[in-house]
């Protein structure tokens, strides 16, 4: 077949996809078609950097607080780099994502890395994931969900954590609530006040680390939290 006939159509504009799904009341519905339309080209996945997030790498090298055990879960694992990094640090890792194409892609990239890859929805967690982890890692997933489901998402992140366990979240936060009110997503920057939802989920804040807000008034923060209780 001539080459030009085999050429694939370019991936759809992610914003059009996002709008379509949000209007239809499906806040997480746009992830799967975005990954599927990328057809294995990570360049078409706007957040894919094909490397573990530097905040996660630093945290693992020098944890703010040591998790009580080695069971770890990665929320919204995308193409799998953070999960693979945890496995390299001898954690027993479960990594899940709502998008089956992302999970299959991650599994293929890290086929020799011992990670349990799962298709699962943070907003409707399977019972066996609840409360079972010493370390919960959330990188840029909550910020990719619109405000209407974000409290529920933060609550669900908290429920993954066992008593005595630790949660590390990396997310974009506005320097003030005023900046977050005018911000156009995705990603939807979190407002400083909404991070309190983690407290309502039973987590205590241990550290909030971040650079100064950039020229847009936002900063990427690393939040370390702990669920009180015996390990
Ligand atoms: C912005 S991407 C970040 C991916 C990865 N954590 C990273 O930093 O490269 C957000 C990821 O969360 C996943 N996701 C969104 N909503 C989810 C949900 N409710 N449950 C599980 N995964 C979800 C998406 O499919 C996507 O892979």
Image (cartoon, rainbow, N blue to C red):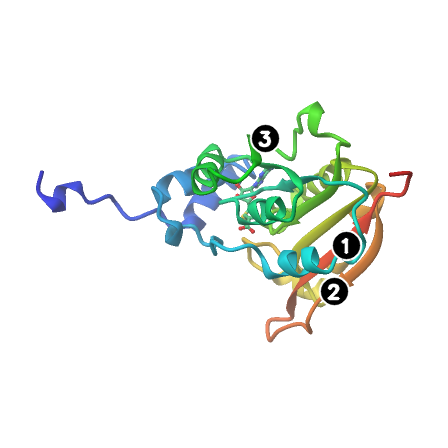
**Left or right placement of residue 74 versus residue 154 in this view:** left
Of pointers 1 and 2, the one earlier in the residue sequence:
2
Are dots 1 and 2 in contact, CB under 8 Å?
yes
Residue 120 — which label? 3
Q: Residue at x 59, y 30 (%)?
A: 120
Question: How many numbered dots are placed on residues in this image?
Answer: 3
Which quadrant, please, contains the N terminus?
Answer: top left
SS state under label 3: loop
Residue 120 position (above or below residue 112): above
- Work out whether residue 151 can be spotted: no
Q: Is residue 157 left or right of residue 33?
A: right
Q: Is residue 8 left or right of residue 209?
A: left
- Whole-Å distance between the Cαs marked 1 and 2? 8 Å
Q: Which mark is residue 188?
A: none
Q: Residue 150 appears in which quarter of the rendering?
A: top right
Point out which mark residue 224 bears. Answer: 1
User: Mark 3 vs ligand 1: CB under 8 Å?
Assistant: yes
- Circle 2 residue: 209
List x then y, in percent, for residue 84.
56, 46
Give whichever of discs 1 and 3 has the lower sequence position.
3
Say which residue appears at 80% left-offset and 60% top-offset: 207
Within 10 Å of the Cα at label 1, are there few (<14), some (14-19), or many (20+) other Cα atoms? Answer: many
Q: Which of 167/26 is in front?
A: 167
Residue 62's x, y, as percent? 73, 60
Q: Is residue 78 visible from the viewing direction of this image?
A: yes
Label 2 secondary element: strand
């Amino acid at each position: 077949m001539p080459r030009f006939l085999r050429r694939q159509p370019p991936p759809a504009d992610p914003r059009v996809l996002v709008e379509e799904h949000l209007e239809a009341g499906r806040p997480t519905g746009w992830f799967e078609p975005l990954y599927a339309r990328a057809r294995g080209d990570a360049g078409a996945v706007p957040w894919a950097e094909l490397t573990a997030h530097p905040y996660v790498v630093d945290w693992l090298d020098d944890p703010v607080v040591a998790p009580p055990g080695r069971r770890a879960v990665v929320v919204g694992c995308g193409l799998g780099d953070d999960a693979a990094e945890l496995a390299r640090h001898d954690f027993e890792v479960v990594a899940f994502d709502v998008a089956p194409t992302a999970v299959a892609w991650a599994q293929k990239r890290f086929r020799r890395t011992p990670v349990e890859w799962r298709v699962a929805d943070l907003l409707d967690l399977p019972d066996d994931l609840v409360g079972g982890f010493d370390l919960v890692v959330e990188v840029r997933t909550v910020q990719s969900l619109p405000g209407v489901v974000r409290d529920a998402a933060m609550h669900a992140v908290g429920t993954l954590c066992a008593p005595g366990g630790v949660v590390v979240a990396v997310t974009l936060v506005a320097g003030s609530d005023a900046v977050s009110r005018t911000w156009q997503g995705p990603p939807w920057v979190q407002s400083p006040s909404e991070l309190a939802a983690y407290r309502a989920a039973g987590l205590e804040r241990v550290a909030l680390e971040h650079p100064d807000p950039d020229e847009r008034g936002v900063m990427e923060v690393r939040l370390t939290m702990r669920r009180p209780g015996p390990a």
